[in-house]
Image (cartoon, rainbow, N blue to C red):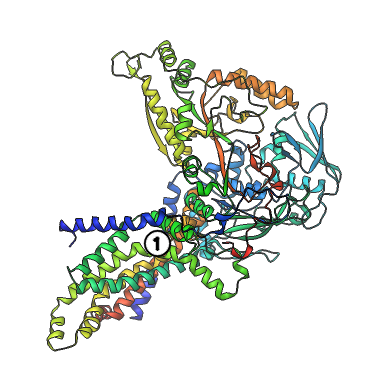
């Protein structure tokens, strides 16, 4: 009955009519009835306590014991509730959190942490070195379901000479130790000693020592944190932190524009395209950007020919236009990197520059390696075989787009690359573990501790280990080993600067880009550092404040 | 009749075992397990620790042994605990030795999804029935064409797009309806009437969006069923003996035209517990669709199997109910069953 041709015309007409109804309805923002739009957010107020900060997050934590939960949503919330012995300051240098100071013995094997005096848990019980020892015992316990135990198992002796002192001894000096202690949330022994840490209700009813404590957790909807009056690090200015779980970024954005949430992280399109086009939003919402925590790279399977040839790797490095990737994929919101460290921090070697985009040099290097276009088909070949390989990546929009841009640039120098996109588990299980790949586009985190032994050391190539590109360079091995033994930051820095110089020269991976972390925060929230320091805007959330003139009317909150 | 019923119920047991066996093996055919999620591809998590986790979850054993363990647990109706969500019980709440209750994952997600799906089913029936009848009565007239066009647009329009447009229009521009979530802040402190209104307001858009796509199928079904019946001899008879038109249509035609709908509703019972991942993500509703999707992504086997098992049981019950209802509504079928 719908197959009669004249009815299509009618359908089209109605569709146009429908669109015509919808478009003005959506474009008309003058009817917005929010008092919010009339508020002037430019006035300055003294920082006072109070208010509620509502933020959106895409995933729900599985529990708030970070060593077991493992996912980023859990660490983000748990970080407001628990303290570690150490933390990273705004410049990403280590400083004390629960520890006031720490000493390293002359043989560099023993670290002694001195806790701050009179520390308390949120339930008013004293926090002592016993709790630290207990946490260490739990993270190294065979029965604990944590993937993060191995660093702590290197401790051969842990002891508590007194209530404020915690001492660990390693069999050999282990420089990343301090970083690992900055990542371990200290748990209360008095509440957990008779509990099975894998199943305990404590994970959903935590008691910590940091600025906030959990007030209410509504599954799948929100987590509400409220001020901890016994906080070990002083008092935060904002009374309540409310994290709403909204999986969809577009829905988050609508909630932000309707002033129902204060803060969300943005993707490059929202940051660079939507916000500049919406002056009404910019009146109420401020944008922030900070160095991201990861970088994207193109990694070669060094066990496969011709990627064992450094000239081929360098040729590909020269052939890829990194700025084009930053502009095209990240809309300019990223930086090129030349080493696996955050630009601008101590470990990043300021003398290093990424390989410039130079297709002629790439062609020359390919020619040197024996690759030339002998048959005139546009693809270079050697021994009669055209240079063709597969770029493998997982289902991640930014990585897919990156691979497409690389494919095109490689074609310019006569290399034929095909792209294959896979779901993560099969990507890992079928291709990475058995090393059945030519080239991958993937990401690694820009680690805060410079130790990258597990990624680049030649001993870490077994299936399931992280040097799956099979990189093996005795000089790099030596430096990585030396870096683990050296606890003095200055000497360590020299070691890792040298390491990244060799790594860049060797080109086992092509460093592509590091995207910025982007966020939008309502202007009622004050005290945010802009521009962001290396640690990002989140380092001083305890200083953020909401002037009472700008606070939401608690009754009208949505 | 009773014997027939008992036989049907008895046959559900081997069917269920077959379904669970197939689901279990298909689930394990997909590469990876809980230890190979993208988040665990972290140099700080060593391969030895991951191997240890696999042993703790019995993932290192052959699939058939794992299936045996699962059946053994299911024999006592124990759905197990989730791998990913801090060992939360998959199906129903449990109490630990200190009296802390932890709610089951399906227990929490199911009522929400059920509520939305039942409401949207009511909406679909409430709208599709009259639309289908009008279409049939005004066959090929403007009203019929208009209705068909409308339901097809509703069917064809991408739900997520319409959802976002409506959220923007009714939530951001006019603040008539909440944008996402299930309840407003401070929901606990409201009197019960405001609480109910608050929840209903949050449900308007999700119910509308999930109802819109179902409208086309049902209303066309009613329309075609009606048309077929209206051309039957007994309708002509009814008309010729001078019954008024309302009796003819609602007393004779509609009853017969609705028979096939029973099958459709029987089949839609298992659908009632399945939520739409896209709608639930956009509206930030913690329902079954999102639960299942996340479980598949995380390879959270106990949760996947829990949802599949409950879905299978409900499908079988739905089929049974549809058959019984059919027998009750249609004497011809009833007689066939009795014999």
Label 1 crowd (10 A; few <14 / some 14-19 / many >=20): some
What percent of the width, then of the height, locates residue B226? Answer: 21, 74
Question: Which residue is nearer to you in this view: B15 or A170?
Answer: A170
Question: Which residue is nearer to you in this view: A334 or A488?
Answer: A334
The quadrant of the picture occupied by the N terminus of chain B is: bottom left
- What residue would you read off at disc 1? B209
Give me the residue at 39% from left, 54% from top: B161
User: Eyeballing the image, is A180 above or below A388?
Assistant: below
Numbered circles on residues, count: 1
Q: Would residue B15 be seen by someone viewing this image from the given angle? A: no
- Look at the numbered disc 1 and give the secondary structure of its residue: helix
Q: Residue furthest top?
A: A368
Give me the residue at 46% from left, 37% from top: A398
What percent of the width, then of the height, locates residue A156? Answer: 76, 36
What percent of the width, then of the height, locates residue B275? Answer: 43, 60
The quadrant of the picture occupied by the C terminus of chain B is: bottom left
Q: Is residue A189 left or right of residue A432?
A: right
Give me the residue at 66% from left, 38% from top: A150
Q: Is residue B42 left or right of residue B314?
A: right
């Amino acid at each position: 009955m719908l197959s009669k041709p004249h009815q299509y015309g009618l359908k089209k007409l109605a569709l146009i009519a429908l669109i015509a109804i919808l478009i003005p309805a959506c474009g008309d923002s003058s009817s917005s009835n929010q008092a919010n739009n009339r508020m002037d957010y430019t006035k300055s107020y003294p920082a006072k306590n109070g208010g509620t900060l509502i933020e959106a997050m895409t995933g729900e934590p599985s529990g708030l014991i970070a060593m077991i939960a493992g996912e980023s949503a859990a660490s983000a919330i748990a970080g407001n509730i628990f303290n570690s012995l150490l933390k990273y300051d705004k410049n990403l240098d280590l400083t004390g959190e629960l520890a006031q100071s720490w000493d390293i013995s002359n043989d560099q094997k023993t670290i002694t942490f001195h806790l701050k005096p009179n520390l308390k848990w949120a339930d008013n019980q004293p926090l002592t070195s016993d709790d630290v020892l207990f946490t260490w015992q739990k993270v190294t316990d065979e029965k604990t379901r944590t993937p993060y135990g191995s660093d702590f198992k290197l401790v051969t002796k842990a002891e508590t000479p007194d209530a404020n002192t915690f001492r660990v001894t390693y069999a050999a000096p282990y420089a990343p130790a301090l970083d690992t202690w900055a990542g371990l949330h200290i748990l209360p022994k008095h509440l957990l000693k008779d509990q099975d840490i894998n199943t305990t209700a404590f994970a959903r009813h935590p008691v910590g020592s940091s600025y906030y404590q959990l007030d209410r957790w509504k599954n799948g909807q929100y987590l509400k944190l409220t001020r901890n009056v016994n906080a070990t690090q002083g008092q935060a200015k904002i009374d309540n932190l409310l994290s709403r779980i909204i999986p969809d970024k577009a829905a988050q954005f609508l909630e932000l524009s309707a002033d129902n949430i204060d803060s969300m992280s943005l993707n490059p399109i929202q940051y660079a395209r939507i916000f500049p086009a919406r002056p009404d939003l910019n009146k109420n919402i401020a944008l922030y950007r900070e160095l991201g925590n990861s970088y994207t790279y193109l990694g070669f399977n060094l066990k496969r020919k011709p990627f064992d040839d450094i000239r081929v790797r360098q040729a590909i490095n020269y052939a890829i236009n990194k700025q084009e990737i930053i502009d095209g994929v990240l809309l300019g919101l990223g930086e090129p990197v030349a080493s696996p460290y955050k630009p601008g921090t101590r470990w990043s070697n300021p003398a290093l520059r990424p390989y410039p985009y130079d297709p002629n040099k790439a062609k020359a290097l390919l020619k040197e390696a024996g690759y030339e276009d002998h048959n005139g088909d546009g693809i270079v070949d050697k021994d009669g075989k055209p240079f063709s390989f597969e770029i493998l990546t997982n289902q991640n929009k930014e990585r897919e787009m990156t691979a497409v841009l690389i494919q095109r640039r490689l074609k310019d120098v006569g290399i034929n690359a095909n792209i294959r996109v896979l779901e993560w588990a099969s990507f890992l299980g079928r291709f990475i573990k058995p090393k059945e790949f030519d080239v991958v586009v993937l990401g690694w985190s820009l680690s805060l501790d410079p130790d990258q032994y597990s990624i680049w050391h030649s001993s870490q190539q077994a299936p399931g280990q992280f040097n799956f590109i099979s990189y093996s360079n005795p000089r790099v091995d030596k430096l990585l080993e030396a870096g683990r033994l050296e606890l003095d930051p200055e000497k360590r820095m020299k070691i890792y600067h040298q390491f990244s110089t060799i790594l860049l020269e060797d080109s086992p991976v092509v460093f592509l880009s590091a995207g910025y972390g982007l966020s939008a925060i309502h202007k009622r929230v004050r005290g945010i550092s802009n521009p962001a320091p290396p640690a990002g805007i989140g380092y001083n959330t305890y200083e953020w404040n909401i002037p009472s003139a700008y606070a939401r009317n608690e009754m009208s909150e949505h | 009749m009773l014997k027939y019923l008992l036989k049907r119920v008895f046959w559900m047991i081997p069917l269920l075992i077959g379904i669970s066996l197939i689901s279990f093996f298909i689930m394990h055919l997909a590469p990876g397990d809980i230890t190979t999620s993208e988040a665990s591809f972290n140099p700080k998590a060593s391969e030895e620790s991951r191997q240890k986790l696999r042993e703790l979850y019995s993932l290192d054993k052959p699939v058939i042994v794992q299936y045996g363990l699962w059946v053994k647990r299911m024999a006592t109706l124990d759905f197990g605990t989730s791998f990913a969500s801090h060992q939360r019980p998959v199906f129903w709440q449990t109490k630990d030795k200190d009296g802390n209750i932890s709610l089951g994952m399906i227990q929490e997600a199911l009522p929400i999804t059920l509520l939305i799906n039942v409401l949207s089913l009511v909406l679909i029936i409430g709208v599709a029935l009259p639309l289908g009848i009008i279409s049939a009565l005004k066959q090929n007239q403007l009203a019929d064409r208009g209705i068909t066009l409308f339901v097809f647009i509703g069917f064809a329009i991408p739900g997520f797009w319409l959802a976002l447009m409506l959220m923007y229009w009714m939530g951001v521009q006019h603040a008539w309806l909440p944008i996402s979530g299930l309840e407003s802040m401070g929901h606990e402190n409201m009197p019960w009437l405001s609480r109910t209104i608050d929840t209903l307001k949050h449900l308007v858009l999700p119910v509308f969006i999930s109802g819109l796509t179902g409208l086309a199928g049902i209303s066309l079904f009613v329309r075609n069923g009606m048309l077929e019946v209206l051309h039957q001899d007994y309708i002509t008879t009814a008309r010729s003996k001078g019954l008024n038109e309302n009796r003819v249509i609602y007393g004779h035609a509609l009853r017969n035209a609705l028979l096939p709908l029973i099958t459709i509703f029987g089949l839609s019972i298992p659908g009632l517990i399945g939520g739409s991942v896209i709608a639930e993500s956009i509206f930030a509703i913690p329902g079954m669709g999102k639960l299942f999707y996340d479980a598949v992504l995380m390879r959270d086997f106990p949760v996947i199997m829990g949802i599949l098992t409950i879905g299978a049981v409900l499908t079988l019950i739905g089929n049974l109910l549809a058959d019984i209802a059919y027998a009750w509504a249609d004497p011809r079928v009833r007689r066939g069953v009795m014999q």
